[in-house]
Image (spheres, helix red, strand yellow):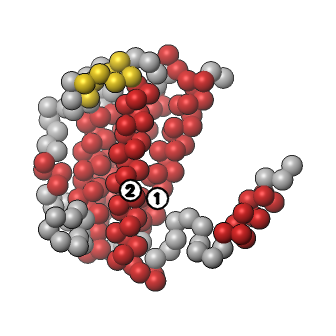
């Protein structure tokens, strides 16, 4: 296996991990929760979902052959509360991720150093992938934080439960013992 192919395999798994955090956050929240924001300057989870989906559709469609900022994208519109039902938010969430994963699965090792453009700026494919990973992880972290604020004690943790780090480490050591 080449370094480039291993990178593609690993980055797809990392995107899946980041998506799973978002999925598990969305699943814990009601429609009203998804639209909650602290104030008018803060984004709700619904707005973040709209933004991420719009970004994914723009960046990952024709990834190797056209600028990642598509003429049809209305980035400013992504920050307006346009989609009200939880089901519709989940649909656009899945559509964006589907485009991303389909594009990643079509990439080959030899594509990694190709030059593509985002907003007319040159990026290697690796740089463009890493740029999007950082962007999505940032916003999904916001979603998790907002979800935790809303749910309080009812929040179902997405990682190691507080106070159970030692037990978790022991479990992992036992699981991976050779």
- In the visual, does 96 lie left or right of 108? left
Question: Please, which residue is most extreme toward the bottom here?
Answer: 153
Percent position (x, y) of residue 50? 24, 53
Q: Residue 64 lies in what quarter of the image?
A: top left
Do we see residue 161 in this rendering? yes
52 or 138, nearer to the observer: 138
Q: Residue 151 lies in what quarter of the image?
A: bottom left
Q: Residue at x 40, y 25 (%)?
A: 125
- In the visual, does 73 lie left or right of 52? left
**Which image quadrant: the N terminus?**
top right
Q: Say which residue label 1 marks.
A: 21
Q: Residue at x 78, y 58 (%)?
A: 173
Percent position (x, y) of residue 53? 29, 47
Q: Say which residue label 2 marks.
A: 140
Label annotation for residue 53: none
How many numbered callouts?
A: 2
Q: Residues within 10 Å of mark 2 (few under 14, many from 20)?
A: many
Percent position (x, y) of residue 146? 34, 69
Q: State the separation of the CA atoms marked 2 and 1.
A: 7 Å
Do we see residue 67 in this rendering? no
Q: Secondary structure at mark 2?
A: helix
Q: Are marks 2 and 1 in contact (CB under 8 Å)?
A: yes
């Amino acid at each position: 296996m080449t370094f480039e192919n291993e990178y593609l395999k690993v980055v797809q798994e990392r995107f899946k991990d980041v998506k799973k955090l978002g999925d598990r956050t969305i699943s814990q929240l009601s429609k009203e929760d998804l639209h909650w924001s602290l104030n008018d300057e803060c984004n709700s989870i619904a707005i973040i979902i709209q933004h991420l989906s719009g970004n994914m559709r723009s960046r990952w469609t024709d990834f190797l052959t056209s600028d990642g900022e598509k003429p049809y994208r209305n980035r400013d519109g992504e920050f307006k509360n346009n989609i009200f039902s939880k089901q519709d938010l989940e649909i656009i969430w899945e559509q964006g991720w589907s485009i991303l994963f389909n594009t990643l699965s079509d990439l080959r090792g030899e594509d990694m150093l190709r030059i593509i453009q985002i907003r007319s700026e040159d990026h290697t494919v690796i740089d463009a992938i890493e740029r999007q990973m950082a962007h999505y992880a940032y916003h999904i972290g916001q979603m998790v934080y907002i979800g935790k604020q809303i749910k309080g004690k009812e929040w179902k943790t997405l990682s190691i439960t507080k106070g159970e780090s030692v037990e978790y480490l022991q479990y992992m050591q036992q699981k991976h013992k050779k």
